[in-house]
Amino acid sequence: MSADVTATQSETPTEASADVPEHEPVAAPNIDWGLAASLGRKVARPGPRVTRYTMDQAHAELADASVRAEAPVRELTGLADGLQIPTARILDRAGWIDAAARSMPSMFGDEPAEDEDSGLVHSALGKVGGVQAAGLLAVLSGAILGQYDPFSLDEETGEPGVLMLVAPNIIAVERQLRVVPSDFRLWVCLHEVTHRVQFSANPWLAGYMRENVRILTEDAGESTVDLVGRVSAAVRSGRSREKGMLGVMQLLQAPEQREAFDRVMVLGTLLEGHADHVMDAVGPAQVPTVADIRAAFDARRRRPQNPLQRIVRALIGMDAKLAQYIRGKAFVDAVVAEVGMAAFNTVWTSPETLPKTDEIDEPSAWIARVL
């Protein structure tokens, strides 16, 4: 799952009045990510029952597919050409939890407390946050098929960016959908490799993402612990299923946070829509049963009880994950059909060339403004 989030455009700061004293921002307590990983591994549901031979075969096939997917994705998009093709990390659910717990402090900007007294407070609150985060990691570990993490360092190259594929989840879904395993594995890799290409060719996206997450957790004096806690409580209490889904505006109150969230959603919609466009454009030539896979997978996406969908819906207050794919792909399809892929790639130039919220549904408005 893709990674999915963005960063903020620079804005002119408001000058503080000389009559109003300035206050140092209150540091947000850290989440104890070590505790989150440890507890998350314990409470995560086990994957499907498979033989060692089947799992080894899946690992080998996914590693090969992640490399084979790179060339057609680069050829179609015109991105990341000439860059090294890194090796994907094939993980089980516990391995994904560990990887996510190592990456998230960087994304959230969690820093250790500087003095002993505040360190004690941060430690206590961090453990509370760690317990809450553990539940989210455990649920997500059973739902994510693949993810590109732009914040972690690749063990081979030392460069930022790691492509992770969660083998037991991929096996579980291909069994559920009754699709050809080798075709489905390559199809998943086409989508996730597109995310790797997006970030590899445009390194500024990772910083943009991190800055928006910082605003979501800090600008209103909110800590990562508070945000994770409220999302966890919304999911557990069932409030997210009352009158539709609990909207993000009920979770995020400050104007700065709402604006950052809008930017997050726009970038996420673009990234997912672009990946789906590439996957469908490349798929027929690479995946023999792509039509069957797409039909079965789209039907699965619309099922309301998927745990990952519940969490995402609790965050955004609508079926936005599905909407991201549909609206984002429609935007990319329309722009590429009108101006071609090379001109479309102008979208990756800077935050200013990203589509605005209303332009996602009006591709011609983005073309007029940017091109």
Image: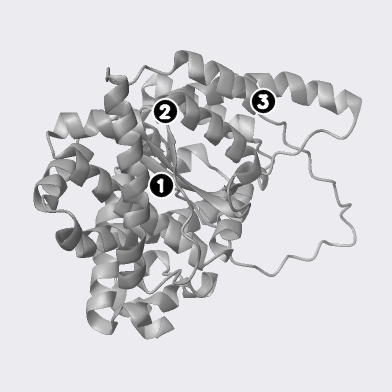
User: Answer yes or no: do the residues labelled 2 and 1 have beta carbons within 8 Å?
Assistant: no
Counting from the top left corner in percent of width and height, residue 46 is at: 36, 17
Position of 278 with respect to 109 (left or right) is left
Residue position for label 2: 92
* Separation (CA) of disc 3 from disc 1: 24 Å
Compared to residue 293, the image places residue 342 above or below, namely: below
Compared to residue 206, the image places residue 28 above or below, namely: above
Q: Earlier in the sequence, mark 3 or mark 1?
A: 1
Badge 3 crowding class, 10 Å Cα cut-off, few under 14, some 14 to 19, many 20 or more, is many
Say which of marks 3 and 2 sits in front.
Answer: 2
SS label for mark 3: loop
Compared to residue 80, the image places residue 51 above or below, namely: above
Q: Earlier in the sequence, mark 2 or mark 1?
A: 1
Residue position for label 3: 32
Say which of marks 2 and 1 sits in front.
Answer: 2
Residue position for label 1: 2
Position of 196 with respect to 182 (left or right) is right
Compare residues 310 and 222 and report the one nearer the observer: 310
Counting from the top left corner in percent of width and height, residue 166 is at: 38, 34
Q: Earlier in the sequence, mark 3 or mark 2?
A: 3
Residue type beneath disc 2: Asp
Badge 2 crowding class, 10 Å Cα cut-off, few under 14, some 14 to 19, many 20 or more, is many
In the picture, the quarter occupied by the N terminus is top left
* Separation (CA) of disc 3 from disc 2: 22 Å
Position of 316 with respect to 335 (left or right) is right
* Numbered tag placed on residue 336 in the rendering: none
Position of 223 with respect to 24 (left or right) is left
Compare residues 49 and 371 and report the one nearer the observer: 49
Residue type beneath disc 1: Ser
Counting from the top left corner in percent of width and height, residue 253 is at: 55, 43
